[in-house]
Image (cartoon, helix red, strand yellow):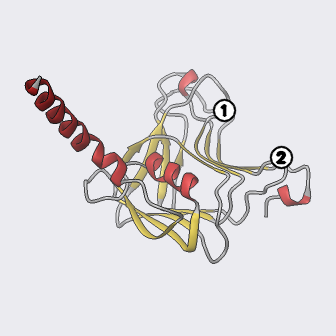
């Protein structure tokens, strides 16, 4: 019996060592200040998805939050939806940290895939964050670089994309049809749903 107990404690210790980095990346309470995204252990988040998931879960507090992104290629498409706490005084900024940052990915059979989607969220800036579609077939094509849309009652206002390139079409040789670098769309059915 003593042997099983020691074996259990050893396995529990290994398990806790493995999951500790996951929990250490989750911030407590609304986000503010300067945080980092990058593959190094010293970064606050390893991916855009980890940062944006935490951002949507926790919201934004006084002074807003700046995400400095380590130069490199990030193979992911991201969505920010229904973000709370943002304002002119509390913005969210994703900024390349002295180098080239590129989000890459492929789409689906749908004709409205986006590399970055912002829904019903305002005061978000992407500065120096390039996007690139890597499709090798028409079905994998990403049609929209940055998609910004409000809901029926919550607009997506004061969002900024700057210092960025949008490369769509992937490795396809055919003429690229129906692609948009930035698409700002409104679903407003009330004045509060308007985009500004």
Residue furthest out toward the front: 1
Query: Marks 1 and 2, Cα distance to the nearest angstrom?
Result: 24 Å
Is residue 122 visible in the rendered image? The answer is: yes
Residue furthest out toward the right: 190
Instruction: Give the labeled residue for mark 2.
Output: 187
> Residue 178 occupies which quadrant of the picture?
top right
Q: Residue at x 25, y 42 (%)?
A: 16
Q: Is residue 1 left or right of residue 73?
A: left
Locate residue 102, reporting x and y percent.
43, 50
Q: For the N terminus, which image quadrant?
A: top left
In the rendered image, the vertical position of residue 5 relative to residue 16, given as above or below: above
Q: Residue at x 51, y 41 (%)?
A: 77
Q: In front here: 166 or 81?
A: 81
Instruction: Give the labeled residue for mark 1.
Output: 177
In the rendered image, the vertical position of residue 17 relative to residue 90, given as above or below: above
In the rendered image, the vertical position of residue 106 relative to residue 154, given as above or below: above
Q: Residues within 10 Å of mark 2 (few under 14, many from 20)?
A: some
Locate residue 64, reporting x and y percent.
55, 71
Q: Secondary structure at mark 2?
A: loop
Q: Secondary structure at mark 1?
A: loop
Say the numbered circle drawn on residue 154.
Answer: none
Is label 1 or label 2 in front?
2
Is residue 72 visible in the rendered image? The answer is: no
Q: Is residue 144 left or right of residue 49?
A: right
């Amino acid at each position: 019996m003593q042997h099983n107990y020691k074996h259990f404690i050893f396995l529990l210790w290994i398990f806790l060592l493995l999951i500790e980095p996951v929990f250490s990346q989750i911030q407590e309470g609304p986000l503010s200040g300067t945080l980092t995204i990058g593959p190094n252990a010293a970064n606050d988040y390893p991916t855009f998805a980890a940062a944006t998931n935490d951002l949507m879960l926790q919201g934004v507090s006084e002074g807003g939050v700046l995400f400095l992104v380590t130069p490199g290629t990030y193979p992911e498409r991201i969505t920010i939806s229904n973000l709370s706490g943002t304002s002119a005084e509390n913005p969210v900024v994703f900024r390349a940290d002295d180098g080239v940052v590129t989000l890459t990915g492929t789409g689906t059979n749908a004709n409205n895939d986006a590399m970055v989607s912002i829904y019903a969220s305002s005061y978000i800036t992407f500065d120096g964050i390039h996007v690139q579609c890597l499709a090798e077939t028409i079905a994998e094509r990403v049609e929209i670089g940055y998609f910004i849309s409000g809901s029926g009652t919550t607009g997506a206002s004061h969002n900024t994309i700057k210092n960025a390139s949008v490369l769509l079409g992937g490795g396809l040789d055919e003429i690229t049809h129906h692609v948009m670098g930035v698409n700002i769309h409104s679903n407003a059915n009330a004045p509060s749903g308007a985009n500004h």
